[in-house]
Image (spheres, rainbow, N blue to C red):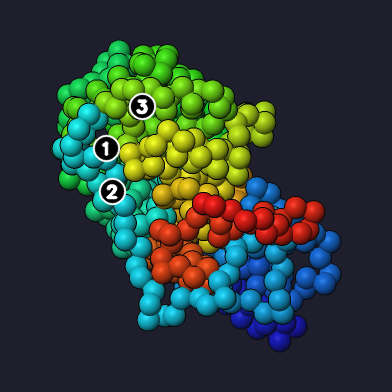
Amino acid sequence: MGTAIIVAAMILLGLIALFIHDKLQTKHTVLRNFPVIGHFRYFAETWGTYMRQYQYLSDWVERPFNRLERSWVYRSAKGVSNYISFGSEAVPTFVFRNAAFPVLEEDRKSYPGKLIGIANGPGACDQPYTAESFFNVSGMSYGALSHAAVTALSRGAKLAGIWMSTGEGGLSKFHLDGGADIIMQIGTAKYGVRDAEGNLSEARLREIAAYPQVKMFEIKLAQGAKPGKGGVLPGSKVTPEIAEIRGITPWHDSISPNRHRDIGSIQELGTFINRVRTITGKPVGVKLVVGDPAFLDEWFSDCTACPEHCPDFLQIDGGEGGTGAAPESLADYVGLSITQALPYVAALRQEHGLQQRIRIIASGKLITPDKVAWALCMGADFVSSARGFMFALGCIQAMKCGSGKCPTGVTAADPRLIQGLDPTDKAVRVSRYALKMRDEVEIIAHSCGLTDPSKFAPKHVTAIENGVAGFRAQSN
């Protein structure tokens, strides 16, 4: 009996020591928020590889992101090797056409960056922006994300030399914290740049444009999670601080209109773009989900006829559903996927001769190097990701984003859960993920015989149909 008591006491002391260790460490949010029991998750994750022959579910079945996709992000963010053994597990829908003579290491070049906005002529702005990275952080609002998560993203983006978008919730001190370049998004409710009646406030717009970090403005028509429906932030998340940033009432549901009330036609859209650009002096773009192809054709025709109406960039968001909580019917069944929309928009831009005038940013489940490189081949100038960077922050796809009870603190509203996410540690992970993405996309480019990813073209990738890759000659 005495021996049993001693063993039990030692186990108890060990658990207490482990509890204290888990609460004090900063690398693993799950362990900080759920000491001791959180180790079961890491045990399952680590040993799952060795136990795969006994699994009833494969690595490819989990949705919306399977285990292999998430693992690539996790390993990249942690700085762990992404090399694989025993051959590929992928079942690709496309493959890249490697060159017979790939680019040597000594001949590789850095991504040269691209200019967004023009300095002269109709539709010019005072401060065009040279974007140095082809991979950046897509829009995620403070409020939807915790202050710790936004702070980590800002600091990590600065470390990696990439931009981040505010999302429709407005510019907060946490976005500015790290010193990263910022895209200020103007959603349908005009949070952050609205007056008391909800209309665009030119004074507030100038105030935000005065921040040197704010490089561009983005007018959001729609997002992939819910095209045709505005954003919703539950009243429990609308703290006095968030309400002040957005210009709304605290503790009430923050519900955006399903479209801008003052933008109901292509001409009104062009006028609004030019108005924001004139007031701010900075590039202005539009975020949308492609649905009606005729709209794009008519819009691009208006851009060539009235250059002052032309946006400086388009962010094409796939209809695959993004970070926002949304009705299942919209997330699953409304809007073209990025694989359908991006090639169409790029071809239409070329048809109208707007390649050098309008930059294209692609988004929609593009979280791994293969998909980012594909998007660049299809005509995107840049790629942005929201959920990829959420995984880099430690998101475990618990699907609790809208509840405020996110166990990793990324989208949590509960201070106890938020405190588990250490911005200093997670900023490094955000940076590592972005830099690893850049490195592996460049590796694909070099394999295709290109010195850098800016030279990707449709001819460098081919779709696989019925298990066979086509090799039809392409001129682009």
Within 10 angstroms of label 2, few (less than 14), some, or many (20 or more) residues? some
Q: Is residue 131 visible?
A: yes
Relative to 22, is 193 above or below? above
Within 10 angstroms of label 3, few (less than 14), some, or many (20 or more) residues? many
- The answer to whether mark 3 and mark 2 are in CB contact below 8 A is no
Residue at image mark 1: 283
Mark nearest the camera among 3 and 2 is: 3
Mark 3 or mark 1, which is nearer the start of the sequence? Answer: 1
In percent of width and height, residue 172 lies at: 29, 40
Mark identifier at residue 337: none
Residue at image mark 3: 303
Q: CA distance from mark 2 to mark 1?
A: 10 Å
Mark nearest the camera among 2 and 1 is: 2
Relative to 300, is 171 above or below? below
Identity of the amino acid at label 2? Leu
Residue depicted at x 22% and y 43% = 128
Q: Nearer the viewer, residue 468 or 375?
A: 468
- The answer to whether mark 1 and mark 3 are in CB contact below 8 A is no
Mark 2 or mark 3, which is nearer the start of the sequence? Answer: 2
Identity of the amino acid at label 1? Pro
Q: CA distance from mark 3 to mark 2?
A: 19 Å
Residue at image mark 2: 115
Mark 1 or mark 2, which is nearer the start of the sequence? Answer: 2
Residue depicted at x 71% and y 76% = 87
In percent of width and height, residue 58 lies at: 77, 61
Residue depicted at x 68% and y 49% = 63
